[in-house]
Image (cartoon, rainbow, N blue to C red):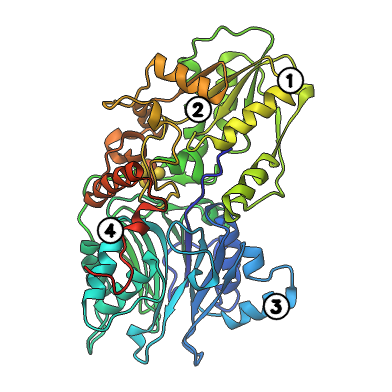
Amino acid sequence: MSDELNHECGIAALYWLDEPQGPSGPAEKAVVDGDVAPLMPGMLLDLQNRGQLAAGMSSYNKSRVQRLATCKGVGTVTEAFRMSRPAKFAQMLSECAGDACIGHVRYATCGADDERFAQPFERYHGRLWKWFCFAFNGNLANYGSLRDRILARQDYHFALNADTEVIMHSLAYRLRGDRAARLSSVMASLAKDLDGAYNIAFLDGMGRMVIARDPLGFRPLSWAVQGRLFAAASESVALTNMGFDNVRSVEPGQMLVVENGKLKVERFAKPRSKALCFFEWVYFSNVASEIDGRSVYLARSRSGEILAEMEDCQMDDSCIVVPVPDTAKAAADAYAYRMHVPCVEGLIRNRYVGRTFIQPSQSRMRSVRGKYTPLASVLENKRVFLVEDSIVRSTTLKALVGRIRQQGKAREIHVRVACPPIVAPCFYGIDMSTLGELFAPPFLPNRYQGRPSADTLAQMAKSLGVESLRYLTVPDLADCLKMPGSDLCTGCVMGKYPTFWGDKMMRCARANSNSGRQGRTYEQNARPQGAAK
Ligand code: SF4
């Protein structure tokens, strides 16, 4: 995507169980002396697409005085774990050696970008079941309200302005008392309070682990067992690359619990309608991943076929299909194949520009422009069908279109988008939380039904500076993902949200947009500490 829409986070977990709970295989054989920590950086590298601001891991080791140990830092996995400095890296792995560990890669959809927000969070306590660390992927739509509620209790204080801290205090509150609470009860109670997307990896000082996926299943979460090795990760690719061959999805509302060295699968919330985030297939997830039984590659490829089925432009010998690298490639290939038009690399992506989103917005704009080079030798005098996975803000797509025309000397540019128009913000972990930043809303009628009209498309195309523009429709998403449309969250493409607080945040986003207020909607709605209630 040219827009640099930012990824959310990724979590991972490993446990060396007391007894084999599955057939043996290569993943299990990679573990030496029951120490799983050396496998964690590799898993996190496979999840790096989900966040590059910080990375870390926490491990449990019963024979260590510091039963839970956490290593984390800002930057990519390579930077955070000092992988380019072998001695430092080896030292970190040795400090985190253990038979259980959880890991995290972070992008900030809530909170600031510094080291204090790096996960896992560790909460030390002298009682083992109250000493825990956890990592979180998602975003709570009601985080401001939960924070206010916690602050209303006597003598509570927040050090960070982030939903991760809300979850930490909420967990700690439920672990109070003189007996170790049952973790399924803790999660069930927590789920009653949380509104939004939350995948959680939790590990306590007794060596108990929980891997939980929220009851609506917004974000993907996979798991597998091989011999004594249990593993879970936000994306299946992290498990298949380790050598697991029986990778399954954690069901929404399901939790995997390791207690006394044994793995159990439990529910903490009753099955209900799902709200899987379709954007995971469209853009976020690794193309090699499979989410809830549907391959990311095949979903993207199907979106290209649908774009070809709806094509109404006449093709001729001067036509070429050009993907915006890299996420639009599968859709562009399938579209070109159906249209009998060559799919060529007319845009070269500079892979070393990376992490443009952590820069201030003006320099971000410059960096993203420097990220693509249009090839005049490919584009000159061609009718270019530019396939993009989605359009969120359009700022960089407009710049890209200008360069394809001027530098690439293309004769015509037609944009084909493998996603419906983004008409509303996301409050569940994708960093597009305001109405004002979005491209499509000003063009759409009040009673928009998920299919832009020909007039609307023509106006949008004019604004982008292209000859034509086509999008997938909202019903096409179900076809791409091969699942009922009712299983998908369509908040950002329809403006109707699957949770109470999603709808409520949308009303706030509208009000903020009308009043010109800036900043993430869910963060604005958290009052400063000490403010009048
Ligand atoms: S609003 Fe859009 S981006 Fe956010 S969870 Fe729903 S489908 Fe995904």
3 or 4: mark nearer the eye: 4
Between 503 and 15, the one nearer to me in the picture: 503
Dot 1 falls on a residue whose secondary structure is loop
Residue receiving disc 2: 417
Q: Earlier in the sequence, mark 2 or mark 4?
A: 4
Report the residue that reaches farthest toward the front: 515
Q: Do residues under tags 2 and 4 come within 8 Å of each other at their CB atoms?
A: no
1 or 3: mark nearer the eye: 1
Residue receiving disc 1: 409
Per the model, the C-alpha gap separating discs 1 and 3 is 50 Å
Q: Earlier in the sequence, mark 1 or mark 4?
A: 4
Residue type marked 1? Lys
Q: Is the residue marked by circle 3 packed among few (<14), some (14-19), or many (20+) residues within 10 Å?
A: few
Per the model, the C-alpha gap separating discs 3 and 4 is 40 Å
Residue at 30 percent of width and 62 percent of height? 144
Residue receiving disc 4: 142
Between 346 and 129, the one nearer to me in the picture: 346
Per the model, the C-alpha gap separating discs 1 and 4 is 49 Å
The x, y position of residue 511, in whole percent, is 29, 45
